[in-house]
Image (spheres, grey):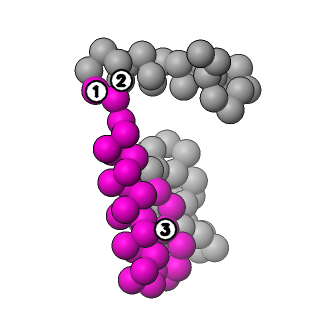
Amino acid sequence: MRARPSSGGMFNNYAIVQGVDHIVPVDIYLPGCPPRPEMLMDAIVKLHDKIQNMKLGANRERQITDLEQARLSGQERPQP
């Protein structure tokens, strides 16, 4: 939800896995500790929009493949 749970933030001890956000996908970064209510609502709305615009089924698999290929080749977005 915010920097500490996903990456450890500025804390580095035995109980925190540093950089776990590079292993576990993070959909929305939410700043603040604790986050302000309006920031939480904004993150929920952004996540809702992201889910609403997500493709389903075979189209989703194709979209994921296209995005992976674009990121591996260094492009921002896949070419149509």
Query: Mark 3 belongs to which amino acid?
Result: Leu
| Residue that label 1 marks | 56
Q: Label 1 near label 2: C-beta < 8 Å? A: yes
* Residue 5 drawn at (x, y percent): 45, 66
Query: Is 73 placed above or below 11 here?
Result: above
Nearer to us: label 3 or label 2: 2
Q: Residues within 10 Å of mark 1 (few under 14, many from 20)?
A: few
- Is residue 47 shown in magenta? yes
Gap in angstroms between the C-alphas marked 3 and 2: 26 Å
Q: Residues within 10 Å of mark 3 (few under 14, many from 20)?
A: some
Which segment is the magenta one? Answer: 28-56
| Residue that label 3 marks | 30
Q: Secondary structure at mark 2?
A: helix
Nearer to us: label 3 or label 1: 1
| Residue that label 2 marks | 60
| Residue at 44%, 50% in the rendered image | 27
Q: Is residue 77 left or right of residue 49?
A: right
| Residue at 54%, 25% in the rendered image | 67
Query: Mark 1 belongs to which amino acid?
Result: Leu
